[in-house]
Image (spheres, helix red, strand yellow):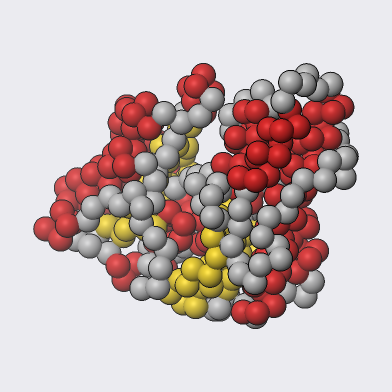
Amino acid sequence: MNILAIETSCDETAAAVVAEGREVKSNVISSQIDIHRLTGGVVPEVAARLQLEVIQPVIREALAKAGVGWQDIDALAVTFGPGLMGSLLVGVETAKTLAFAHGLPLIPVNHLAGHLYACLADEPDITFPYLGLIVSGGHTELVFMKGVNDFELIGSTRDDAAGEAFDKVAKLMDLPYPGGPEISRVAAMGDPEAISFPRAMLDQPNYDFSFSGLKAAVRRELVDRKLSKPELADMAASFEAAVVDALVRKTVRAAQAYRPRAVLLGGGVAANTLLRRNLAAALGTTKLLATPAELATDNAAMIGVAAYYLKDAAVSGPGLFDLAADPAAALAAA
Ligand code: KG4
Ligand code: ZN
């Protein structure tokens, strides 16, 4: 089964062809990073307009790179939420129109389900339950996954998402957008124990996170000071260690309580080497399935993988036009 997947939830315009939920035949991403760097972050109206300009060529390229034509496609898939309304609309309306024109079913996929299923792209045997940690620019969630479309939210951030914290702290430190990879690069030269930043909510008996206090602590350190390069590296390393520590400790605690078959680590921040390493070590005998690095930040292949498992939700014919973009779509039990 060849699925043509489309993802436009934020600032990437992406299309991919995925066979049987595991063979990524093409994975095309048109990134707006260079443009959002000028403003230090994503401006929603700009993001949506740029999506509209490139969506058609991106889809054509995904088909060409996979070496397939429309006659080889069995279904379309699209991210319907959560994300930016203007950006989501571009993908959803394009997918509906193409599905109607080519007489194909369309599988709606929650963006966060895509991040979780990306961890299962290379798994030969999918056996539930899993515990998922989703860490992206917009979300930080711990999810107990009991079946293909059966998600229980057990914890989330009370304020900033982990990726958002990386992006905001990078901005404070005059590092470019997106902040995650930049902070990691600078942190590699620093001492993670140089500054003792707060690890919020660790003493509370829940699986929630909070990163805004950490951001404020970094801001306090930076007030009226011009840091030297080594000081900047120490601050980046200490900040990264604090974020990773909070994520690892709550995830390990949840794994002990829920006893999943494996822990899934997905979302853009899953590309972080320290997080991957420390989480794997702290989980001990519980297996960690971290998203392959090339599928961690937003892409359409992860939507194509998820769609294969979620194909029962497909809509077709006139039913297509009932499908709506949902910027606040929750990942909840089906
Ligand atoms: O999943 P994603 O591509 O988009 C959303 O769904 O939000 O995640 C983007 C986020 C950004 O905040 C970015 O700074 C962060 O992922 N990120 C990282 C790394 N690579 C990307 N954070 C920490 N370390 C990284 N290596
Ligand atoms: Zn994402």
Percent x, y of residue 270: 63, 51
Quick check: 204 left or right of 149?
right
Q: Quadrant of residue 303?
A: bottom left
Percent x, y of residue 325: 28, 50
From the viewer's perspective, is residue 40 above or below residue 59?
A: above
For this rendering, which residue is in front, 132 or 205? Answer: 205
Quick check: 237 left or right of 58?
right
The N terminus lies in which quarter of the figure? bottom left
From the viewer's perspective, is residue 52 above or below residue 99?
A: above
Q: Is residue 216 visible?
A: yes
For this rendering, which residue is in front, 139 or 267? Answer: 139
- Residue that protrudes farthest toward the left in the picture: 318
For this rendering, which residue is in front, 248 or 273? Answer: 248
From the viewer's perspective, is residue 289 above or below residue 77?
A: below
Across the whole image, how many numbered discs are drawn on residues? 0
Please name the residue shown 49% across and 47% down the image.
138
Quick check: 196 left or right of 24?
right
Percent x, y of residue 295: 56, 49
Please name the residue shown 70% across and 49% down the image.
243
Please name the residue shown 65% across and 34% down the image.
169
Please name the residue shown 54% across and 60% down the image.
156
Quick check: 201 left or right of 145?
right
Q: Is residue 244 visible?
A: no
The C terminus lies in which quarter of the figure? bottom left
Q: Quadrant of residue 229?
A: top right
Percent x, y of residue 102: 20, 50
